[in-house]
Amino acid sequence: MADRQRIEFYRHSLGDAEKARVLAALDGMILTTGDAVAEAERALADYLGGPEVVCVDSCTAALHLALLTNNIGPGDEVIVPAMTFVATANAVLMAGATPVFADVEPDTGLLTVETIAPRVTPRTKAIIPVHLYGLLCDMEALSAFAAARNLVVIEDSAHCVEARRGRVRPGSHGRCACLSFYATKNITCGEGGALVTRDPALARRVRRLSLHGMTTSAAERYAKRYRHWDVGELGWKYNLDNIRASLLLPQVGKMDSHCARRRKIAARYDEAFAAVDGIDVMNVRNPAWSARHLYTVCVNAAGRDDMLVDLQEQGIGVAVNYRAVHLLQYFRRLFGFRRGDLPAAESIGDRTISLPLYSKLTDEQVEQVIQATTDTVFGYERRSAVALAR
Ligand SMILES: Cc1ncc(COP(=O)(O)O)c(C=O)c1O
């Protein structure tokens, strides 16, 4: 494919509006948490239909603070999916609690009541459903299940800000929802995150704990009459600054149009791959339920790693989201997991390949990705058939 341009796995769509906001922030006096952060919080809250939003410096920090402010710690168990990014489980360990991995629904990769139920013990305090790849979990069923057992629901919404599933949106049903603005996310400031909640008292506590537990922020101390600050409880250094918040602000208004473009690309991928033996696409059940953050296909496990190389050699950027977390070395050592323990998560982890999906992709590039993926899978299947026939 020498005549073709390389298609990156991800490209952000930051442009003149974002640059102008950052320059304006640099001209201001407060570079750390201040007006731009407050404005980004209001814009996100409006977008999500009015909950409280506290910006922090990562989704991992938001998950950590969500657990701490719900009094989850040593001796408590928190159910997390085995198919997610490692941050979901790490945040539980950071809070001093124990992550208990549950398997996922094979065709969506999501936690369900059926996969969670066998993992509940008298020590279970919370569940963290992950809206994997952008698809909202069935939050109505999960919250009813949790409410009946007095469990806290914390949504890992790193992949999903835009989707709706009936009345469900990120943060509408969980006690907290945690967003990510990491470098490859649907809206990004390089590194950043937010905690969403409908409880103003919880939001105030999260805000304090995101800055050492201090009772006033730097902006409040300098912009207004000086007040001594105090510390009522131990906090962390998780606050977001005005510079990164300024990058976020113009993007909030563009989230829906970018999501619409990703949905269109995903629909084209779905249509093209439906006809290809050897490619299974993840089920989103209803396109409106997914923010379409990542487009992952499943291929033959034995050939997956070679196919990743093959696609890269054809100039297509790819990723693996994710290998099953319980089989990563650290978690195997900590909990003694073995292959076969959580088969659906392992099967996705062994077979998945993520293809480029972002609003800047042109229709022509989408067709190139389809062609390269189809050729790669056909090539592998043909070589396997020949090897088998020998
Ligand atoms: C599902 C999931 N949860 C949590 C995170 C952590 O996000 P952050 O990098 O903002 O801490 C990520 C980031 O990639 C993620 O994909």
Image (cartoon, rainbow, N blue to C red):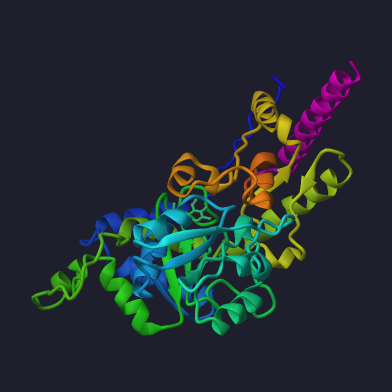
Viewer-nearest residue: 70 or 271 = 70
Query: Can you say whether 120 is above or below 85 in the image?
Result: below
Q: Quadrant of residue 10?
A: top right
Residue 351, percent from left and from top: 70, 40
Total marks shown come to 0
Instruction: Report x, y in % for residue 141.
Output: 66, 77
Residue 373 lies within the magenta run: yes
Q: Nearer the viewer, residue 49 or 100?
A: 100
Question: Residue at 66% across / 44% down in the picture?
Answer: 361
Report the magenta residues as a range. Answer: 361-390
What is the magenta segment's predominant secondary structure? helix
Q: Tell me: residue 311, above or below residue 188.
A: above
135 lies above or below 340: below
* Residue 278 appears in the picture as rendered: yes
Residue displayed at 17% across by 76% down: 232
> Residue 321: x and y, percent?
59, 45
